[in-house]
Amino acid sequence: MDVTTLLTLIEHYGYASLFFCLWLGIVGIPIPDELIVMMGGMVASLGLLHPVPAFFVTYFGVVSGLSLGYILGRAIGGPVLRKLQKKKNIEKYLTKSYSLIERYGSSSLCISYFFPIVRHLVPYLVGIGRMSYARYALFSYTTGFIWTLVFFSIGRFFGKNLETIGETVHQYGLWALVSVLVISGLYWLTTRIKNRFA
């Protein structure tokens, strides 16, 4: 699904389309989460949706989709995990997810936000590991708020380059995010300086 199709969905279904596209990310809807969140920021900047409700609906879509993974992990984790382990294309992401959990414990929920696919697997795996919901929520929801705010803001200020930014971040993860933030910050700073001395 591309930006145009996503924009059409948002024009027709408004806030609900933002929420459900993110919530359904857990079942592998073929749209990168980063792109949907940035699209929320872009449509807010265009006046199609109000910025504050658009942000919170987007945030609730992100955290509810990941929470669904956590709940499924606690409820029916083992059988589904065995099926996932048989899929070749998911094996490397499972390995990365296990590695994050082993190395960083609860903090892996924060770190996993910056890795596509892994962000959906880590909540599932910590659910299987019987992490308490309170602990899960503390780490995941706090990071989710910041992660959503960053990408939503990028969408608001750099919406016309949305597809390129979304694909880059989805493909390269954390390093792309850092690069995007640095470039975005420099662009914003130079624009402010130019406007001040114009």
Image: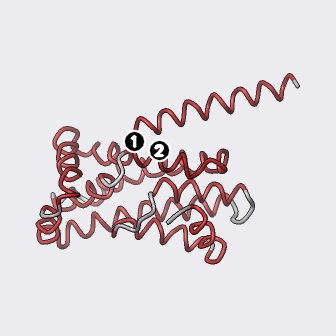
Q: Secondary structure at mark 1?
A: helix
Q: Are marks 2 and 1 in contact (CB under 8 Å)?
A: yes
Q: Residue at x 75, y 30 (%)?
A: 191
Q: Position of residue 198 (x, y in %)?
A: 88, 25
Q: To which residue does mark 2 refer?
A: 168
User: In the displayed structure, would residue 73 be above or below residue 138?
Assistant: below
Name the side, left or right, on which 159 lies relative to 16: right
Kindly identify the amino acid type of the residue bearing the numbered disc 1: Tyr
How packed mark 1 is, by other alpha carbons closer than 10 Å (few <14, some 14-19, many 20 or more), is few
Q: Position of residue 52 (x, y in %)?
A: 65, 58
Q: Residue at x 12, y 72 (%)?
A: 79
Q: To which residue does mark 1 refer?
A: 172
Q: Which residue is at the front of the view, 7 or 133?
A: 7
Q: Seen from this angle, which residue lies furthest top? A: 197
Q: Residue at x 17, y 64 (%)?
A: 84
How packed mark 2 is, by other alpha carbons closer than 10 Å (few <14, some 14-19, many 20 or more), is some
Q: CA distance from mark 2 to mark 1?
A: 6 Å
Q: Which residue is at the front of the view, 195 or 130?
A: 195
Q: Position of residue 53 (x, y in %)?
A: 63, 63
Q: Secondary structure at mark 2?
A: helix
Report how many numbered discs are placed on residues in the image: 2
Name the side, left or right, on which 55 lies relative to 157: left
